[in-house]
Image: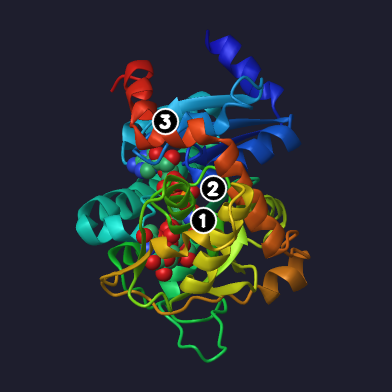
């Protein structure tokens, strides 16, 4: 068996661990890497929390360069087993608790996964890579973070750059900020080849319908209220998820070790304006008069500590690595709304909880 495992490990040019690959962004990264790099083996490690859904990967799950492992990034011993079995030489770390509202209700889970989980992964990589004869040569630990660590901007045309001071406000962003610090500390202390990127709000297919865009598309379709926090004046900078995945691919291969890159679309929208675009698009695609669903807008109590504005300056990434978003927002939102309307089964399996029952049966423990 050991000979067979060694043979399989050697058959691939690289063995890349992608954590959180059953989630929204992770599934797009896994798909891109499986299709673009048949010479790499992609190991998707995911705990399958409520946010993990293997249906996000149904089209690539039988690819010969793909392996799924159900595991918790906080389980250090399991991580060591996975590292030794698959001879991991690159990590793209996306696994996290990602929803701000949940972090307000349950901050400890966010500290556990985002802080301790990231630390466990760093420590497992360090232990295994330092044992190799070539040590950190050819290795890479790429940590995916968020623009929320920088705090909130005023409506004054300023942007977050890579040197903006960290100033997180929610338990979610505080936990991500902490994990970013640990990643950088592993470079500075142990020489681990790390990279961190901070990205703005993603949108597109397979996003869990607790987040603004998929939640509102589904509610409009069902004629349910659209809960707008506060006055709907908060501003977010939206990037199509496949453009984020392309940036991750580029940075994983060409980014400078120990560096940080901001990723964003220079595409700011006030929530209420974005919501009206979504309403018009859903109405039109359902064959209704554009704007007929605006009566569903319901202003509700604001999110606690709600950051007013995020806006990313991604000039460095453009200048140094030549990345820029490929999709205009109008096209991205049209494609996204169409996808959710065309994939009602995917949505229904989540809203009924059916998707979790299936995994409980398939992957015990
Ligand atoms: P998501 O919530 O859709 O997916 C997270 C995935 O991580 C799920 O598959 C879940 O099962 C898995 N996971 C959670 N806890 C785990 C654990 N303890 N062990 C193993 N797996 C675990 O999140 P997303 O929106 O795809 O975000 C992915 C990453 O990108 C996160 O690190 C997030 O902070 C970051 N990010 C997200 C956005 C965004 O707009 N969604 C923007 C910038 C950065
Ligand atoms: O900026 C990057 C971040 O973007 C990521 O790090 C997070 O993982 C991701 O969840 C996202 O955070 P936001 O809090 O910006 O996303 P969310 O979809 O929850 O909310 C977007 C905006 O819409 C925000 O201003 C809150 C508002 N909102 C959200 C929901 C769910 C509403 O007004 N009503 C809602 O029901």
| Residue 326 x, y percent position in the rendering | 75, 59
Residue for point 57% across, 79% down: 161
The answer to which of 191 and 254 lies nearer the viewer is 254
Return the mark for residue 144. Answer: 1
Return the mark for residue 25. Answer: 2
Relative to 152, does residue 57 appear above or below in the rendering?
A: above
Label 1: how many Cα within 10 Å (few below 14, some 14–19, many 20+): many
The numbered mark, 3 or 1, whose residue comes first in the sequence reads: 1
| The C terminus - image quarter | top left
Q: Can you tell me whether the CB of the residue at mark 3 lies under 8 Å from the nearest atom of ligand 1? A: no
Observer-side mark, 3 or 1, equals: 3
Q: Secondary structure at mark 3?
A: helix
Return the mark for residue 349. Answer: 3
Q: Can you tell me whether the CB of the residue at mark 2 lies under 8 Å from the nearest atom of ligand 1? A: yes
| Residue 317 x, y percent position in the rendering | 69, 68
Q: Find out whether the residues at labels 1 and 2 contact each other: C-beta distance under 8 Å.
A: yes
Residue for point 49% across, 47% down: 207
The answer to which of 101 and 29 lies nearer the viewer is 101
| Residue 56 x, y percent position in the rendering | 53, 34
The answer to which of 2 and 206 lies nearer the viewer is 206
Q: CA distance from mark 1 to mark 2?
A: 10 Å
């Amino acid at each position: 068996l050991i000979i067979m495992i060694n043979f399989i490990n050697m058959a691939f040019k690289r063995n890349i661990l992608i954590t959180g690959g059953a989630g929204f962004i992770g599934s797009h990264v896994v798909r891109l890497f499986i299709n673009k790099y048949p010479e790499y083996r992609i190991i998707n490690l995911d705990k399958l929390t409520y946010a993990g859904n293997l249906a996000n990967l149904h089209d690539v799950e039988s690819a010969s360069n793909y392996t799924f492992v159900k595991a918790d990034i906080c389980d250090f011993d399991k991580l060591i087993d996975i590292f030794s079995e698959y001879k991991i030489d690159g990590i793209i770390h996306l696994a996290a608790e990602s929803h701000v509202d949940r972090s307000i209700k349950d901050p400890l889970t966010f500290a556990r996964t985002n802080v301790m989980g990231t630390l466990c992964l760093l420590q497992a990589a360090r232990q295994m890579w330092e044992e190799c004869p070539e040590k950190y040569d050819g290795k890479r630990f790429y940590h995916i973070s968020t623009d929320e660590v920088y705090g909130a901007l005023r409506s004054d045309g300023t942007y977050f750059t890579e040197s903006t001071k960290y100033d997180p406000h929610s338990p979610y962003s505080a936990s991500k900020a902490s994990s970013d610090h640990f990643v950088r500390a592993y470079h500075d202390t142990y020489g681990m080849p790390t990279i961190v990127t901070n990205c703005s709000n993603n949108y597109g297919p397979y996003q869990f319908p607790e987040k603004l865009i998929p939640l509102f598309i589904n509610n409009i379709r069902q004629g349910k209220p659209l809960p707008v926090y506060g006055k709907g004046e908060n501003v977010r900078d939206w990037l199509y998820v496949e453009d984020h995945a392309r940036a991750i691919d580029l940075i994983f291969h060409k980014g400078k070790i120990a560096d940080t890159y901001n990723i964003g679309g220079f595409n700011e929208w006030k929530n209420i304006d974005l919501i009206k675009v979504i309403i018009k698009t859903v109405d039109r695609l359902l064959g209704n008069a554009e704007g007929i669903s605006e009566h569903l807008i319901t202003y509700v109590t604001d999110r606690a500590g709600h950051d007013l504005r995020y806006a990313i300056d991604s000039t460095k990434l453009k200048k140094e690595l030549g990345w820029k978003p490929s999709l205009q927002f109008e096209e991205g939102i049209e494609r996204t709304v169409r996808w959710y309307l065309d994939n009602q089964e995917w949505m229904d399996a989540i809203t009924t909880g059916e998707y979790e029952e299936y995994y409980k049966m398939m992957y015990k423990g």
